[in-house]
Amino acid sequence: MDNTRVYRMIFAGVYPLYIQKAEKKGRTKEEVDEIIYWLTGYTKAYLQKQIDTRVDFETFFAKAPKLNPNVSKITGVICGYRVEEIEDPLMQKVRYLDKLIDELAKGKAMEKILRK
């Protein structure tokens, strides 16, 4: 499967959609940010820099300070694929983020989303 199109998507273009999805279900931008910080190791300032410089998803994850060691606890189906079975490491990271935002929008508690 050619995932180049997904990798070249600008993170700053998708980020507002994550927030919109969460807010439609009564969740907040701060919760979306907390998920991103947890997953990637970004700080508030560094995340904003990535948004301002309009990096693509490939760069966004390549520059992530540290992927959370508990990502292996993220399981389930997103876009018809089991996230734990996705072989392409970059696509798996993108789908991890999608899955976490989905869980937020579905009303799951932050403690469970962040696998605490």
Image (spheres, helix red, strand yellow):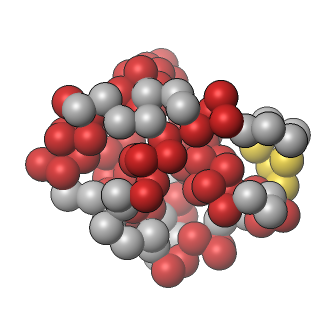
Give the side of residue 106 with respect to residue 42, left or right: right
Res 62 seen here:
yes
Q: Quadrant of the N terminus?
A: top right
Foreground pick, 51 / 78: 51
Question: Total of numbered circles in the picture?
Answer: 0
Res 96 seen here:
no
Q: Position of residue 6 (x, y in %)?
A: 63, 33
Q: Position of residue 57 (x, y in %)?
A: 49, 41
Give the side of residue 47 with respect to residue 98, left or right: left
Give the side of residue 46 with respect to residue 60, left or right: left
Whether 49 is drawn above or below 96: the answer is above
Residue at 53 percent of width and 64 percent of height: 112
Q: Position of residue 54 (x, y in %)?
A: 31, 29
Foreground pick, 48 / 21: 48
Give the side of residue 96 with respect to residue 87, left or right: left
Q: Position of residue 115 (x, y in %)?
A: 53, 71
Residue at 62 percent of width and 55 percent of height: 90
Residue furthest left in the image: 45
Residue furthest bottom in the image: 69
Whether 34 is drawn above or below 111: the answer is above
Residue at 31 percent of width and 45 percent of height: 33
